[in-house]
Image: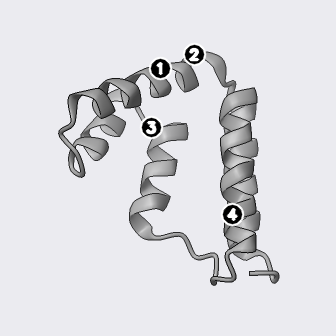
C-alpha cells in the first residue's frame, strides 16, 4: 500500500489545504472509486473517456494492475475511509 497510500494521503493533504469545500468533483470521485475498487476494464474505459493518449492509457493500466496485485481488501477499505473522512471533515 506504500505507493497508493502515499498518493491518497498526498491528495488528502492537498484537499485540506486548498481552502475549498473538499467536495470531490463527481468525475474524480468516480475515478478514485474505479481505481481502488473497480475492474481494470471499467477503469480503463473511464480513463479513455477523457484521453486516448496511448502512453497515458498504458500507464493507467500499469498502475491499476499494481493496485490490483499489491493492495489487500483491507488496504482498499482504509483508502475509502480516508477519502470519506476528508469529504466529511469540518476543516474543509
Q: Name the residue under label 1.
A: 65
- Relative to the observer, which residue lies in front, 23 or 50? 50
Q: Please say which color scheme the image uses.
A: one colour
Quarter of the picture containing the C terminus is: bottom right
The secondary structure type at the circle numbered 2 is: helix
Name the residue located 78 percent from the left edge and 76 percent from the top edge. Answer: 89
Say which label, 3 or 1, has the lower sequence index. 3
Name the residue beneath numbered marker 2. 69
For this rendering, which residue is in front, 20 or 81? Answer: 20
- Side of 56 where 23 appears, left or right: right
Q: Residues within 10 Å of mark 3 (few under 14, many from 20)?
A: some
| Marks 4 and 2, the one that precedes in the sequence | 4
Which comes sooner in the sequence, label 3 or label 2?
3
Crowd tier of the residue under label 1, counting other residues whose Cα lies within 10 Å: few below 14, some 14–19, many 20 or above? some
User: Where residue 38 is drawn, which disc sits there?
Assistant: 3
Which comes sooner in the sequence, label 4 or label 1?
4
Q: Is residue 1 visible?
A: no
Q: Find disc 4 in the rendering and name its residue.
A: 14
Q: Where is residue 81 in the image (x, y as percent from the top left)?
A: 74, 54
Amino acid at each position: 500500500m506504500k505507493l497508493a497510500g502515499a498518493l491518497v494521503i498526498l491528495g488528502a493533504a492537498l484537499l485540506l489545504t486548498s481552502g475549498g469545500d473538499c467536495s470531490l468533483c463527481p468525475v474524480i470521485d468516480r475515478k478514485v472509486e474505479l481505481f481502488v475498487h473497480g475492474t481494470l476494464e471499467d477503469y480503463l474505459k473511464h480513463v479513455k473517456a477523457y484521453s486516448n493518449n496511448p502512453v497515458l492509457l498504458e500507464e493507467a493500466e500499469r498502475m491499476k494492475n499494481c493496485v490490483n496485485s499489491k493492495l489487500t481488501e483491507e488496504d482498499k477499505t482504509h483508502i475509502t475511509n480516508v477519502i470519506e473522512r476528508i469529504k466529511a471533515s469540518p476543516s474543509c
